[in-house]
Image (cartoon, helix red, strand yellow):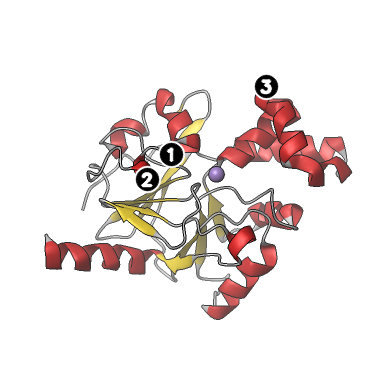
């Protein structure tokens, strides 16, 4: 087991959040939801999700593209729902005055049509809430730890990355790893989990698991138990080294 300091790293934003072990229930992770609230509810029903005991982790990008962005934002009010910030949340924050720059206008035009119907003050409140989200989280599963950030990891060491504000853009937007630019294992955590780049099916790159299956376009939203993903990795490693 690898231990990670149990404190958040404060920079221009909270980069990292440490999540304690869930001793009463199960932990699930879901790929990019992108407004596909009904798909998510179907997935949760299928696994018999128990909101009193189980937890759901999102790899980010809960809004835009699909029909129910607001319903997805309301998930943030649920104590069982935890997420890292995706690049779509980042765009909303910037578009609602939290950042500025060229991409703000781009978001309203390209993705944010749904938000034009929402009271601007309400949108500001959502932007503030989204700004509180960490860029990365490390979840303790007792014998092992799992790192989650939206797009991909930056560099070869999870612990160095979550201390480094210059890694934030890669964690939110990067697409190098799936192009085969870094086929190694990331150190400092047992496995990592990401979304961001739509795939036909989830894919491993070293000890990194990519699970965005383009829910809105394909109708397939991937939801899995964290321990199942880890066991899949460990079994393959034990067999093939
Ligand atoms: Mn994304």
Name the residue rendered at 44%, 67% in the picture. Answer: 224
Q: Which mark is residue 175?
A: 1
Residue at 50% from the left image edge and 33% from the top image edge: 14
Report the residue marked by disc 2.
178
* Secondary element at tag 3: helix
Q: Is residue 99 visible?
A: no
Q: Please tell me whether residue 191 is drawn above or below residue 230 in the rendered image.
A: above
Classify mark 2: helix, strand or loop: helix
Q: Are marks 2 and 1 in contact (CB under 8 Å)?
A: yes
What is the x, y in percent for residue 46? 55, 79
Q: CA–CA distance between discs 2 and 1?
A: 6 Å
Give whichever of 166, 77 is nearer the camera. 166
Residue 52 falls in image quadrant = bottom right
Give how far across and how far down residue 93 sits, in percent. Answer: 67, 33
Distance of label 1 from label 3 (alpha carbons): 21 Å
- Say which of 173 and 89 sits in front: 173
Q: Which of the 4 image quarters holds residue 233? A: bottom left
Q: Indicate which disc residue 102 carries.
A: 3
**Dot 2, crowdedness within 10 Å: few (<14), some or many (≥20)?**
some
Mark 1: secondary structure: loop
């Amino acid at each position: 087991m690898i231990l990670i300091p149990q404190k958040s790293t404060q920079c221009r934003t909270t980069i990292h959040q440490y999540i304690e072990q869930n001793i009463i229930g199960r932990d699930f992770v879901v790929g990019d939801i992108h407004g596909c609230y009904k798909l998510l509810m179907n997935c949760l029903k299928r696994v018999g999700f128990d909101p009193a005991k189980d937890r759901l982790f999102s790899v980010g990008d809960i809004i835009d593209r699909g029909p129910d962005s607001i319903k997805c934002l309301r998930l943030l009010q649920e104590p069982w729902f935890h997420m890292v910030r995706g690049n779509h949340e980042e765009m909303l924050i910037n578009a609602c005055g939290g950042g500025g720059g060229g991409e703000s206008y781009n978001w309203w035009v390209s993705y944010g049509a749904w938000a034009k119907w929402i009271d601007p003050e309400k949108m500001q409140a959502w932007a503030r809430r989204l700004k509180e989200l960490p860029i990365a989280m490390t979840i303790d599963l007792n014998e092992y730890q799992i790192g989650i950030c939206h797009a991909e990891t930056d560099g070869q060491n999870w612990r160095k990355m979550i201390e480094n504000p210059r890694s934030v853009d890669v964690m939110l937007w990067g697409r190098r790893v799936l192009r085969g630019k870094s086929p190694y294992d990331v150190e400092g955590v047992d496995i990592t989990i990401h979304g961001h780049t739509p795939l036909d099916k989830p894919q491993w790159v070293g000890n990194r698991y990519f699970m965005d299956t383009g829910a809105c376009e394909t109708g397939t939203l991937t939801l899995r138990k964290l321990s199942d993903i880890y066991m899949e990795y460990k079994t393959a490693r034990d067999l093939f080294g």
